[in-house]
Image (tube, grey):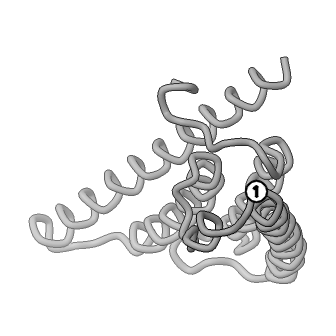
Amino acid sequence: MFKSFYQGLYRFLRWLSSGILALNVLVIIYSVFTRYVLNHSPIWSDELSRYAIVASVMLAMSCSYVEGRHMRVSYLEQTVSQTARRFIEFYQWLAIAGVALFFAYISFRYALSLSKFTSMGLSVSKSIPLMSLPVGFMTLFLMALLKGPFKKPLNREEVC
């Protein structure tokens, strides 16, 4: 059950991130079409595409962590003993979980502090699109907790 929840959450995050990225591509194509063919570009398209790319990246970062595709230097892990390697893996896991939780808290407070302001193009509170930051960091924290410090990265074949 635990592993199926972990894999289901992973699949959902990949699907959602891909969907937001596809929406971003459609918005940009629409914006280019209206700008160069109709000679009039809606102001909301630039703002929506900017927020959509941020949301897509924030959700995809937890998937890249689970797959082991995040940027890191693994040379040190390969040259030390098994005990030292496990200590390094635990330290990396603890650092990622701690930093993700801290950034989730900070970005949540920041997004709430902008609730009085509205975006020019979308005419919604700036807190709404900026909530993608704490949501992304919380999904990274959750996926780091579910993965654990010593589990191997998931392959796409395992979860698809």
Query: Residue 61 versus residue 93: which sits nearer the camera?
Result: 93
Residue found at the very far front of the displayed protein:
81
Give left or right: position of 156 versus 62.
left
Position of residue 119 in the picture relative to residue 95 (left or right): left
Identity of the residue drawn at 74% across and 56% down: 140
Q: How many marks?
A: 1
Quadrant assignment for the N terminus:
top right
In the rendered view, would you say 115 is above or below 92?
below
| Displayed quadrant of residue 40 | bottom left
Q: Residue at x 86, y 79 (%)?
A: 106
In the rendered structure, which amino acid carries the disc numbered 1? Gln
**Residue 37 coordinates in the image, percent (x, y):** 9, 65
Which percent across, then down, holds residue 33? 17, 61
Query: 99 or 68, which lies in front?
Result: 68
Residue that carries the numbered disc 1 in the rendered image: 82
Image position, residue 94 (x, y; %): 86, 65
In this picture, residue 133 sits left or right of residue 71: right
In the displayed structure, does residue 25 sit left or right of residue 7? left
Identify the secondary structure beneath mark 1.
helix
Q: Nearer the viewer, residue 2 or 23?
A: 2
Q: Residue at x 76, y 71 (%)?
A: 127
Residue appearing at x 55%, y 71% in the figure:
75
**Would you place residue 91 above or below residue 155 in this image?**
below
Q: Position of residue 73 (x, y in %)?
A: 56, 73
